[in-house]
Amino acid sequence: MCLAFGGGDHKLVGVMEMNTIRRKAKIWPFVVIGVILLGGYIVWDFAQHRRVEEYVTKSPDVPGTGVPGGPDAELAAFHQVKDRFTRKATAGGIRITVIWDTPEFFRTLAVAEGAQGMKRPDAVYHEYEKRFNVYDNLIFTVIMESESVDLRTYAVKEKSLLRNDKEISITPWQWSEARGSSSRHLEGVLSFPQMTAVGEHLIGHLIGEHLPGEKPPTVLELVLKGLPGEQEAVFRWELPQNP
């Protein structure tokens, strides 16, 4: 009896093991498929990120110049923001356009470029943020045109000044001239630090921010000095006032 019972017990264990194996055999294909899908997504995400990095690296030296006009909402939104931050002047026989490339400018630029085929506007913005360090710098696009003045002789970096209405001023740390510039058409990106060497904030810790109890600046001006005829051009933006 004991032997018979023992044999039945072994058979029962064997059946249970077979059932377990069968269940695992049914589950494993789903596990394999899940692993393949996850691996495929990781590879795709990495490829998309590299594609965005390459896109931003190869994009025009002056951000936003490649965005066309059109009825699409994303394109229209970018051009509205761009126009809102654009200032123009003529001085010393030179037509000058200056665009303040704010974080809002770059965000709408990323969305507009995303609408043209880059499916990851958040990644595009992230790359622009790294490339221009938009939360530590104040970025401006400068475009100069003239029929008579050799623009290559104008030292943009040395002749530029950024100031506010609290008598705080900053000189640029970088001028990046676009590859398509010439003696009659000069364009590039001018970069200023947001804070002076002694710790004075030109517009606040971030755009629109200020220290508690401190009256924030209301105006930001970019000055281009030493233009032909000892003229200068001043470009002004009203700063947002947070309570």
Image: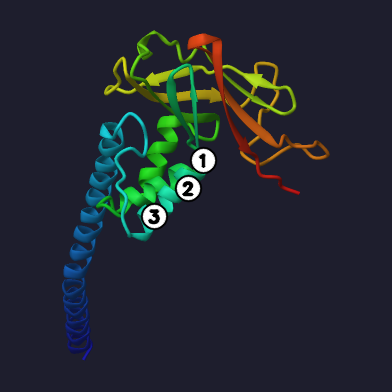
On residue 76, the disc is: 3
- What is the x, y in percent for residue 45? 27, 50
Q: Distance between the residues labelled 1 and 3?
A: 14 Å
Q: State if disc 2 and disc 1 touch (CB < 8 Å).
A: yes
Q: Quadrant of the N terminus?
A: bottom left
Q: Mark 1 points at which residue?
A: 85
Nearest to the observer: residue 34 or residue 47: 47
Q: Which residue is depicted at the point 37% across and 60% down?
A: 73
Which image quadrant for residue 32? bottom left
Circle 3 — which element? helix
Amino acid of disc 3: Ala
| Residue 204 visible within the image | no
**Residue under label 2:** 81
Q: Which of 55 and 21 is in front in this view?
A: 55
| x, y percent for residue 86 | 49, 38
Going 70% across and 23% down the picture, which residue do you hit? 200
Q: Give the farthest residue toward the bottom.
A: 1
Q: Which residue lies furthest to the right in this view?
A: 213
User: Which residue shows up at 72% across the image and 29% down it?
Assistant: 165
Left or right of 229? Residue 200 is: right
As helix, strand or loop, the secondary structure at mark 1 comes to loop
Q: Is residue 96 left or right of residue 3?
A: right
Report how far apart the C-alphas of labels 1 and 2 lie in the structure.
6 Å
Q: Relative to residue 231, is residue 217 depicted above or below?
A: below
Amino acid found under the numbered disc labelled 1: Phe
Q: Please indicate whether residue 32 sits to the left or right of residue 45 in the image.
A: left
Q: Is residue 207 shown above or below 2?
A: above
Residue 243 in sight here: yes
Q: Where is residue 208 in the image (x, y as percent from the top left)?
A: 65, 41
